[in-house]
Amino acid sequence: FSYDWKGSAVWDAGNGTVDCHYEARIILRPTGSVSGDKDLTRLLGKNPFATKETIHDLFSKKLRKYLDYEFEDYCTEDDYYQPVVEDFGSNLEYDLQKWSEENGFEFVSCEGDGNDDGYEPKFRKGWY
């Protein structure tokens, strides 16, 4: 199971923001326990001949939702210190191992990189 993930989040310090981005190429291996996934069971109950693309889409959506939440949480965790987006990789590996165990996969590898657009101060209307 390979998946290309692109995450984005905004860190807001009240007086300015930083747009955060991370891209990763993820490889996971399904295990025998993936067959117990409730969403997969429901999908196959409706259509026992579901294509591998349909099944891949199912798990891609679940993984994207999970990683989007984790990245948003990482970037907005501290109100006073701008996140170091490049360091999210160690969190990502941990998050992928956790997600894999919970969803019937084995973590194989992950390569990624992050960046931010820099600090953008907010200005008040009418302020000169």
Image: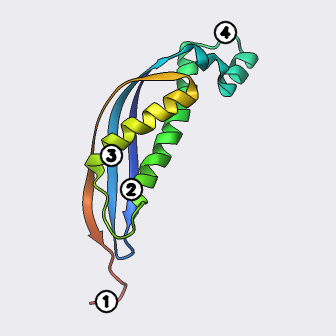
As measured in the structure, the alpha-carbon distance from the residue carrying label 1 to the one carrying label 3 is 36 Å
**Residue at the spot of label 2:** 75
Between 11 and 73, the one nearer to me in the picture: 73
Q: Looking at the picture, does residue 14 appear above or below residue 46?
A: below
**Residue at the spot of label 3:** 88
Indicate which disc, 1 or 2, sits on the residue closer to the N terminus. 2
As measured in the structure, the alpha-carbon distance from the residue carrying label 2 to the one carrying label 4 is 41 Å
Q: Residue at x 70, y 11 (%)?
A: 48
**Residue at the spot of label 4:** 49
Amino acid type, callout 2: Cys
Q: Residue at x 72, y 23 (%)?
A: 42
Amino acid type, callout 1: Trp
Q: How many marks?
A: 4
As measured in the structure, the alpha-carbon distance from the residue carrying label 4 to the one carrying label 1 is 63 Å
As measured in the structure, the alpha-carbon distance from the residue carrying label 1 to the one carrying label 2 is 29 Å
Taking 118 as reference, is 48 left or right? right
**Residue at the spot of label 1:** 127
Between 53 and 23, the one nearer to me in the picture: 23
Q: Looking at the picture, does residue 70 appear above or below residue 42?
A: below
